[in-house]
Image (cartoon, grey):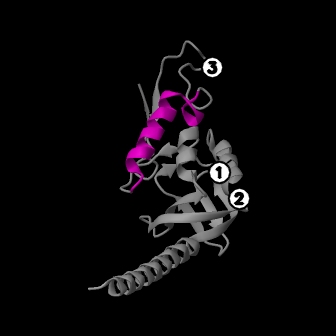
Amino acid sequence: MNRWHISVLGGILFIISLSLNIYFGYSLYKERKANLVQVIGVIDGDTVVLENKTRLRMRQMDAPETEYCGGNQAKELLASYVLNKTVRIEEQIPDQMGRAMAFLSIGNIQVNENMIASGWARYHSDSTSQTARLKEVGQQAKAKKRGIYSELCLQTINNDNPTCIIKGNLENKRTSGRKLYY
């Protein structure tokens, strides 16, 4: 092969490479853009309403309902992150009831992780690409007594009757709903 053949072959390979990069780059851009949606409402600390009126639960986290300790704080924090903003939906799956669950991101901010880190949502196990990181973040929030792990929501003393040493637990409402005292 002479120099001219090598130059032509190099030019052809360059054009093919450039074309493939443009094609795959556009495909990735199109795919990422397809996962972008605006949040028009916040139901509670782990559920949002998207622009198409569908509800989306936040994956791998569980925030208290608004009537429980920390519920309003969780809702307000989530609203500050996502309300009226465009978010990227990642790793969406249906839950046991068929409702959509996913991770939400805004730019480089992973909203689910930030909610767990704040302590206003607890880590909820699930098998995802984020499992190890979110579990660690949840353990840190608990160790640092943030949010629902703070004295605001966890009491070690009965303020109404400090001499009372009875401990109580509530069983799952769906199974029995029994109240147990020790």
Secondary structure at numbered mark 2: loop
Rounded to the nearest angstrom, the CA distance separating label 3 from label 2 is 37 Å
Q: Residues within 10 Å of mark 2 (few under 14, many from 20)?
A: some
Asked if residue 147 lies left or right of residue 9, the reply is: right
Marks 1/3 in contact by CB < 8 Å: the verdict is no
Q: Name the amino acid type tagged 1.
A: Leu
**What is the x, y in percent for residue 55?**
59, 67
Please name the residue that numbered disc 2 is placed on.
83
Q: Amino acid at mark 3?
A: Asn
Which secondary structure lies at badge 1?
helix
Q: Which residue is mark 3?
A: 159
Q: Taking the image as drawn, is residue 11 in sight?
A: yes
Give the labeled residue for mark 1.
78
Quadrant in the rendering for residue 30: bottom right
User: Mark 1 vs mark 3: which is more N-terminal?
Assistant: 1
- Whichever of callouts 2 and 1 sits on the residue coming sooner in the sequence is 1
The x and y percentages for residue 101 are 49, 63
Q: Amino acid at mark 2?
A: Leu
Judged from this view, the residue extending furthest toward the front is 2
Q: Quadrant for the C terminus, please.
A: top left
> In the rendered picture of this protein, how many numbered marks are placed on residues?
3
Segment tinted magenta in the rendering:
129-150
Q: Which residue is painted at 48% across and 57% down in the image?
A: 59
